[in-house]
Image (cartoon, helix red, strand yellow):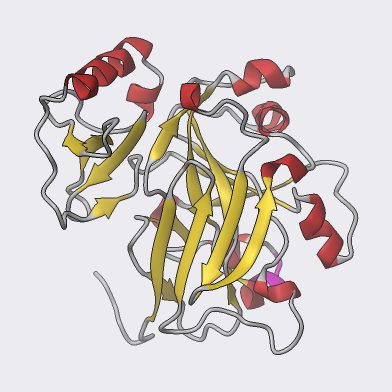
């Protein structure tokens, strides 16, 4: 099942694509696509039945597509989790996953803009498989059991400002800017993804393919990552885990490195999870929002 959110920012309503790719409004069935829904098999079954019946109202053409899940309680990122990414960086895969956190304010929809932070010089793209938790997970040592806690999967772009990361002392400085986590266009429920370790990932900038990889080359599988993370923190329904990016990021390309600039269009796709298309815009450092 492919679940979405539609409508103006802050006023999104739940939706789903039916088997004929018709976008249906789910407002009469559930209030939101969130952890409460993903963790409730009975409610999910009711949504499936309603979508299959074909009687739900169509979403009008041109309606904005927002982030497919409501704002997560936390976003957990993983670094250096692809063999080809580590190879191009000239480093070994870490003995333990590299973990960082991103604020939920970085979340935007699949066709919203990526805003360059004031003074940006090294803003980079990272196509990733996003994993949305559907069941509370804590201190689970078994990757197979941990994988069963997944509520769904989605396409994500873990945008990073490399200059701020390099300045240290933490990665969070380069990961936390508003709009730095475009997700969607839809969330695919876990029952519809046969093998999360067999998904293609691609990313283009202005039509030029920059990244092409496969989740088969993850150093730590989705189940292994979730099991490990559950020993560090409790993962709750609706939380989002970004599982790492394959090779091809701008920071590791030859000079002049093709970092994102105003006017660029970034397209990111994970096989079966849909393609997002985001435009890069500059933000005036004089702009203040209160």
Instruction: Using the image as rendered, state which of residue 136 and residue 86 is in the foreground.
Output: 86
Residue ID at (70%, 89%): 256
Asked if residue 138 shows in the view, the reply is: no
Is 197 located above or below residue 151 in the figure? below
The count of marks equals 0
Residue ID at (64%, 21%): 146
Residue ID at (41%, 40%): 72
Q: Hey, which quadrant is residue 233 in on the image?
A: top right
Residue ID at (81%, 51%): 83
Asked if residue 188 shows in the view, the reply is: yes
| The residue stretch that appears in magenta | 165-169
**Residue 111 at x, y percent in the picture:** 34, 61
Left or right: 65 with respect to 148? Answer: left
**Residue 196 at x, y percent in the picture:** 62, 33
**Residue 192 at x, y percent in the picture:** 47, 26
Which residue occupies the extreme front position in the image?
A: 20
Left or right: 192 with respect to 211? Answer: left
Q: Is residue 124 magenta?
A: no
Which residue occupies the extreme top position in the image?
A: 42
**Residue 113 at x, y percent in the picture:** 35, 69
Instruction: Using the image as rendered, state which of residue 158 and residue 120 is in the foreground.
Output: 158
């Amino acid at each position: 099942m492919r679940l979405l959110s539609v409508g103006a920012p802050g006023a999104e309503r739940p939706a789903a694509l039916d088997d004929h790719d018709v976008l249906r409004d789910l407002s009469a069935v559930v209030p939101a696509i969130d952890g409460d829904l993903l963790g409730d098999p009975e409610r999910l079954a009711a949504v499936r039945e309603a979508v299959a019946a074909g009687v739900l109202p169509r979403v009008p053409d041109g309606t904005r597509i927002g982030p497919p899940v409501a704002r997560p309680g936390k976003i957990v990122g993983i670094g250096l989790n692809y063999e080809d990414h580590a190879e191009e960086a000239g480093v070994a895969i870490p003995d333990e996953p590299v973990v960082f956190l991103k604020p939920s304010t970085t979340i935007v929809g699949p066709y919203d803009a990526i805003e360059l932070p004031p003074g940006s010089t090294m803003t980079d793209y990272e196509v990733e498989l996003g994993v949305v938790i559907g069941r509370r997970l804590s201190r689970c040592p078994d990757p197979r059991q941990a994988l069963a806690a997944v509520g769904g999967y989605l396409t994500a772009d873990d945008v990073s400002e490399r200059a701020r990361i390099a300045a240290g002392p933490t990665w969070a400085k380069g990961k936390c800017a508003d709009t730095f986590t475009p997700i969607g266009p839809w969330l695919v429920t876990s029952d519809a993804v046969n093998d999360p370790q067999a998904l293609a990932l691609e990313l283009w900038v202005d039509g030029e393919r920059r990244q092409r990889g496969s989740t088969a080359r993850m150093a730590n599988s989705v189940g292994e990552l979730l099991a490990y993370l559950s020993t560090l923190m409790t993962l709750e329904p609706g939380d989002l885990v970004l599982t790492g990016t394959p090779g091809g990021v701008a920071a590791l390309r030859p000079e002049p490195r093709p970092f994102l600039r105003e006017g660029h269009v970034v397209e990111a796709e994970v096989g079966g999870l849909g393609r997002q298309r985001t435009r890069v815009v500059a933000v005036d450092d004089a702009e203040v929002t209160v």
